[in-house]
Image: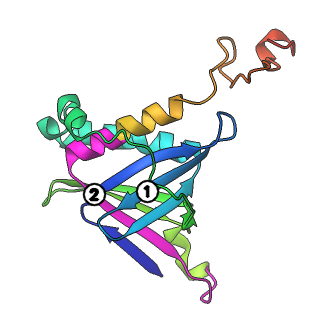
Amino acid sequence: MTLVEFDPPERFVLGTVGPPGQREFFLQASDGSRRVQMALEKLHAQVLAERIGELLDQVAGLESTVAAAAAAADNAPLDTPISQDFRVSALALSWDDERHVVVIEAHDHDPDEVDDLDPVEERHSLRVSLPPAQARAFARRCETVVRAGRPSCPFCGGPVDESGHICPRANGYKR
């Protein structure tokens, strides 16, 4: 199993490639000489942002305020070229109380089912340690990227394409 660790990374960002409705989500972790790029689902990014926010609200206090996050924000686009080193299958989130950092792990397999895996197939994992302000900034960027997709239907909440969509709340009529 390959474990790549960034403690802390120079950059840890979420971004997308493609137009709304067809976007691919990528996490990038990098330092001076290394960069790891992972593809993940939109739902992974959304839940990760929510959980980081909840975790920081519980344990980080003033270290993770919105003002601190604004100072640590990374709004630059993904580094290019963009290629997938692995696809995220499972995420883990924890708080290291001794070091006061958020630890995020991304795996291309379920770590609880390692015994069931083919021993020949190589597995990949990433571990990133972020100070609270950088973790809050990362979570805020995730929220922004997730919301930047297709607009939601005001009636059913489903995504609306440029041509509209068949709304179940309107008895199947197109809106």
Q: How busy is the neighbourhood of tag 2: few (under 14 within 10 Å), some, or many (20 plus)? A: some
The magenta span reads 117-138
Name the spot of residue 60 as percent of width and height, x first: 18, 42
Answer with the quarter of the image where residue 143 lies.
top left
Front residue of 138/79: it is 79
Helix, strand or loop under label 1: strand
Left or right, residue 175 beside residue 40: right
Tell me if I can see residue 4 in this picture. yes
Task: Identify the residue at horizontal 50%, vertical 70% (top origin).
Answer: 112
Helix, strand or loop under label 2: loop
Distance (Cα) linking label 1 and label 2: 10 Å
Residue 63: say if magenta.
no
The amino acid type found where label 1 is placed reads Gln
The amino acid type found where label 2 is placed reads Glu
The quadrant of the picture occupied by the C terminus is: top right
Task: Identify the residue at horizontal 30%, vertical 64% (top origin).
Answer: 31
Which residue is disc 1 drawn over? 28
Name the spot of residue 25 as percent of width and height, x first: 56, 48
Which residue is disc 2 drawn over? 10
Q: Earlier in the sequence, mark 1 or mark 2?
A: 2
Q: In the image, is residue 105 above or below residue 2?
A: above
Task: Identify the residue at horizontal 37%, vertical 70% (top origin).
Answer: 34
Q: How busy is the neighbourhood of tag 1: few (under 14 within 10 Å), some, or many (20 plus)? A: many
Answer with the quarter of the image where residue 96 lies.
bottom left
